[in-house]
Image (tube, rainbow, N blue to C red):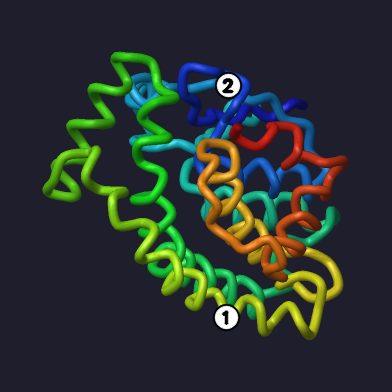
Amino acid sequence: MTVLLYDLVGSDPTRPFSPHCWKVAFALAHKGLAFERVPTPFTAVAGVEGGRHKTVPVIREGERTVGDSFEIALDLERRYPDRPTLFGGAGGEAAARFIERWALVTLHPYLAQSALMDIHDRLEPEDQAHFRTTREVRFGKRLEDIPMTRDERRPAFRASLEPLRSTLTFQPFLGGESPLFTDYIVASAFQWVRVISDYEFLENEDPVGAWLDRCLDLHSGLGRSVPAAA
């Protein structure tokens, strides 16, 4: 049975960009489950599956729907225990919870604010209006003004990645010798800006970039199925 994945897109339905949806895409591929993306722009999210879910990702498998990227990963792990593990046990689930919080607090704010205009410019007009209104309320300033400090803030962002760099000197993936959901959480944050913005978030020789390349190559190049923004 093919799983349906409601996936956030802009004006180009072939360029899904939500980090949370990418987490689920990687998790489904990790479990070896066939899935089909359902391109879903911002203004269509409220109508997904009759409005039962307020955000995407949402997956449908037969009569079942599940929302929230972490809950989807847990659901896949528990329903498909005979397939490659996403967590490696209860301790791995707990560690993944920490990594998700770290990514949301450390990575997402800078990435989101830096790429806001890139996201806006890739949306349909009706979605642009929605995006502008909601983000200007959230940040308390004009959309155009939010990314203005990204250059001066970039060195501090790169420095904040040192725990990730240091970990990758011991092992090729956050999960160890092979990837786990922890890798997909962090890689999906960088995939988000990779497919939506041509801004250089990482230095060319950053080991984080080499790790991201390894993640993009996984599952027959799933991450590379969407080219980088140009």
Q: Quadrant location of residue 153?
A: bottom left
Q: Is the N terminus in the top left, top right, bottom left or bottom right quadrant?
A: top right
* 16 to the left or right of 82: left
Amino acid type, residue under disc 2 in the picture: Val
Q: How far apart are marks 2 and 1 (CA)?
A: 36 Å
Q: Residues within 10 Å of mark 2 (few under 14, many from 20)?
A: some
**Residue reaching furthest top?**
125
Front-most of 199 and 54? 199
Q: Where is residue 107 in the image (x, y as percent from the top left)?
A: 46, 63
Q: Is mark 1 on a helix, strand or loop?
A: helix
Residue placed under numbered mark 2 in the picture: 38
* 175 to the left or right of 149: right
Q: Residue at x 54, y 21 (%)?
A: 39
Amino acid type, residue under disc 1 in the picture: Glu
Q: What element carries label 2?
A: strand
Q: Where is residue 223 in the image (x, y as percent from the top left)?
A: 72, 42
Q: Which residue is drawn at 51% across and 71% down?
A: 158
